[in-house]
Image (cartoon, helix red, strand yellow):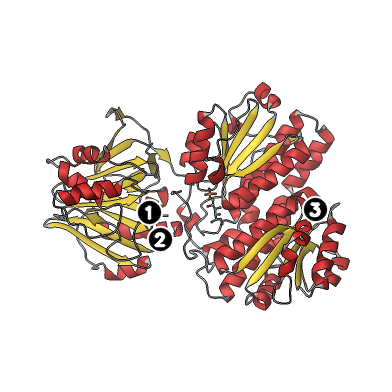
Amino acid sequence: MCGIVGYAGPRRAAPILLDGLKRLEYRGYDSAGIAIGQPDGLASVRRVGKIQVLKDAVPKDMAGAWGIGHTRWATHGGVTEANTHPHCDASGKIAVVHNGIIENYRALREMLVKEGVAFKSETDTEVIPNLVAKYYNGDLEAAVKAALAHLEGTYGIAVIHADEPGRIVGARNGSPLCVGVGDGEMLLGSDVMAFISSTSRVVYLNDGEVVALTPSGFKITDRSDRSVDREADAVTWELGAIEKDGYPCFMEKEIFEQPDSIGRALGGRLDQENATAKLGGLNLDRRYQRAVSRVNVIAAGTSWHASLVGTQLLESVARIPAQAELASEVRYRNPVVESGSLWFAVSQSGETADTLYAMREIQRKGANVLGICNVVGSTIARESDGGVYVHSGPEIAVASTKAFTSQLAAFYLFTLHMARMRDMSRAEGERFLAALAGVPDKVRLALAARDRIQAIAKKYSRCRDFLFLGRGLLYPIALEGALKLKEISYIHAEGYAAGEIKHGPIALVCPEVPSVFLVADDPLREKVISNIKEVKARGGPVIAVGVEGDAELEAIVDDFIPVPKMDCRFYPFTMVVPLQLFAYFCALELGRDVDQPRNLAKSVTVE
Ligand code: AGP
């Protein structure tokens, strides 16, 4: 969603802010702007559309060594230049960028209008610079703190004042914000991407904290105005990891990175000696783990699909009752939190508002919540009681691919760990471990079907509706395949348990609606073949993702995509790959913006 960048230092701020905004593009946005402090006041440029449009509008030699920038994903008010951040107070001396939603902005706006303020936008944000102006008495930090006392809702903000050169005040409540610590310069960002080309030292803010920064340092204060001492962390992501590396877009690069990213998720965690998995970050003693009687998982979107696989696996392999739920539902349904239940919050970004708030609610009820996150230092990672980093490396494309397979890896590791503490024998542990260690190579082989998948995508990309069907562990993969296609190609797709189609969806089957079936060589194979025949009998085209060498299957479908043979519990890793590629090539055929699909944001930090 929206992104924030700030810079104070000796260099020209404009190119640094524009570079930061470019790197924040992946979050999803529809307009962008910057405000820069100059000797005669603040200069601001805002534009609707891509960062390139803003870049073209910013004078090449724009002076000023401190400023703030923003990418806006519209919530309050349409996508217009007037609603684009930064927003200034009536005098034009104070500029603010804001992520989040000010829930009581209407009341604040009415109050300020009565005091004579004329508003120029429809946004909730514009009340902030005007409140700061109301309290400004020569000290920006004090005025921001006084203004914050009136705000209800969520915010990450950055504020500058024309009369306080080199100073930026930031504040966080529910929307992430962090400081980039440079040499003789300081930066601010909604995430580390905002400043990764300038520094790899980061200090994360917590909710309720305010930071005042100048080129030479920064000072953090908490809700009670006590000063907070916090060391900088090192950003482990390399700049190279956030470049396209010769690929036309990030999504293709990230799909092809999966053998490596899964390898990183497994790295150092396969305990051959004990035929189990080592997960150092769980922070739970063995007796507690042994006594876990239920696992509940909360997540959203693709992370929820990974959790559906994970919980099925936990039940069938470790024999622990397990359930995955949508975080947005859990939060409001007052869930029963039993003693003995262990919870997980699964999130690539670690910032998804639904997942974060559900996690806090569960913690409030006294349960341990572990995180499965990709982004190191993200809010869910920091607030969870322990967990597993999946180490996918930065995922830039809005549609999640490599983070999904790394989340699967985390669940497979956890399942092995729990199963070996219970009834799984050493011999079975060894088999499971060997199959898990072999996953990166199998995924590499699955990727070899690239050209065949591209040709199939070309053939079907003009269809307007698709069904994705699978059973057992492949049912969540069908959901994921449908989500990928919807997200980036805007083709309507439904994921279903294959056995369920006769209960309704089969009414959709006709020559214009292809069905994509996932068929493993497992005990459910014959049942899925019957489902395929039901579809074929009604004139529906069928694309099957199946096991290499399955001639019987290949003979009855219109198009066949092979994946290599493996232990059938591990097909979720390989069978998702053709679906990712299929969605990708359909989107390319249709000329879509693959990395930044319309209306979507990478990390959904509002409800
Ligand atoms: C995935 O392709 C989607 N963009 C989306 O469903 C995403 O998985 C969801 O918003 C959850 O994000 P998270 O993993 O960062 O919490």
Residue at position x 48%, y 65% in the image: 598
Residue 202, by quadrant, is top left
Q: Mark 3 and mark 2 in contact (Cβ < 8 Å)?
A: no
Identify the residue under disc 1.
3
Whether residue 443 can be seen here? no
Task: Tell me whether the residue at label 1 lies in contact with that at label 2, contact meaning CB atoms closer than 8 angstroms.
Answer: yes
What is the distance, in whole Å, between disc 1 and disc 2 at their CAs? 8 Å
Q: Give the labeled residue for mark 2.
A: 29
Number of other residues with Cα within 10 Å of mark 3, as a class: few under 14, some 14 to 19, many 20 or more: some
Query: What mark, if any, has residue 566 been given in the picture?
Result: 3
Q: Determine the image quadrant of residue 291.
A: top right
Q: Position of residue 282 (x, y in %)?
A: 60, 31
Residue 380 visible? yes
Q: Amino acid at mark 2?
A: Tyr
- In the picture, measured across the screen, residue 41 lies left or right of residue 53, that is left
The amino acid type of the residue labelled 1 equals Gly
| Image-based side of 388 in relation to 57, left or right | right
**Residue at the spot x=82%, y=67% of the render?**
534
Secondary structure under tag 3 reads: loop
Disc 3 under 8 Å from ligand 1? The reply is: no
**First along the sequence among labels 1 and 3:** 1
The three-letter amino acid code for the residue at tag 3 is: Met
